[in-house]
Image (cartoon, coloured by chain):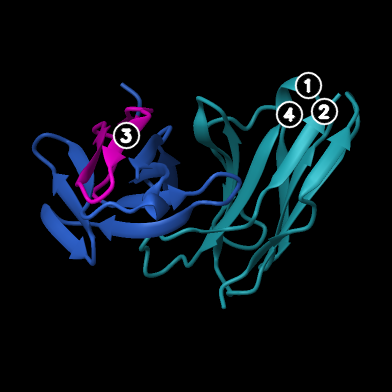
Chain colours: A blue, B cyan
Amino acid sequence: QKEVEQNSGPLSVPEGAIASLNCTYSDRVSQSFFWYRQYSGKSPELIMSIYSNGDKEDGRFTAQLNKASQYVSLLIRDSQPSDSATYLCAGKVYDKIIFGKGTRLHILP
Amino acid sequence: DVKVTQSSRYLVKRTGEKVFLECVQDMDHENMFWYRQDPGLGLRLIYFSYDVKMKEKGDIPEGYSVSREKKERFSLILESASTNQTSMYLCASRFGQPNTGELFFGEGSRLTVL
């Protein structure tokens, strides 16, 4: 199993709906997880980090960590066309930050 | 404002040439990283550095080396460029402590090896 895995998509979601992005991780990944957003032709930027089991909310974004099932998810409420991007899940393996391949999200107007 | 600067946005080199990719950060970060990003493969870690003169191999170090003589600068070196090293190269940095993991990325260097 790869250390951090994501479905590459594309995931298409109507404007105003909830977008749900998922990521699974292996035993090697420690309990620090990050969601980065990358617009086409741009560099990744951090949007959420989560370190403990449960939910963490920041505006329209909610990160969820389930340690027992080894998955982390990102929910985007009231999706906007500006949310169209690639979302990268990342986790820590010792001091390395390892990324999944990313999920492309399209918000349909 | 946080700043990670990669000196070259676009480079075209020939097979066998030596290539230097430079990265400078102005945030006094201890840790610096080099990734490459390829379609379908995502971001893959080449090398990282905990601090000055310290370096660790990432997942795909073959064909690359690095140099970190000063805290703010982390260089990626391709001793003899090959066509399979055509890629987008991303430099990133972060604080060593607290070990929050937030990476700040440069704008990337797109390298084409002919």
Q: Residue beneath label 2, please? A: B113
Residue A82: quarter of image: bottom left
The answer for which chain carries disc 1 is B
Q: CA distance from mark 1 to mark 2?
A: 5 Å
Vertical relation: B15 (above or below) A102: above
Q: Secondary structure at mark 4?
A: loop
Q: Label 3 to label 4, Cα distance in Å?
A: 30 Å
Q: Is residue A26 left or right of residue B23?
A: left
Real-space CA distance between mark 4 and mark 2, rounded to the nearest whole angstrom: 5 Å
Does mark 4 fall on the same chain as mark 3? no
Between label 3 and label 4, give the one nearer the viewer.
3
Residue A17: within the magenta?
yes
Which numbered circle lies on residue A12?
3
Mark whose residue sits in front, 3 or 2: 3
The reply to whether discs 1 and 2 touch (Cβ–Cβ < 8 Å) is yes
User: Helix, strand, or loop for circle 3?
Assistant: strand
Mark 4 touching mark 2, by CB under 8 A? yes
Residue A71 painted magenta: no
Q: Are marks 1 and 4 in contact (CB under 8 Å)?
A: yes
Q: Please name the residue shown 43% across and 47% down the image.
A: A97
The residue beneath circle 4 is B86
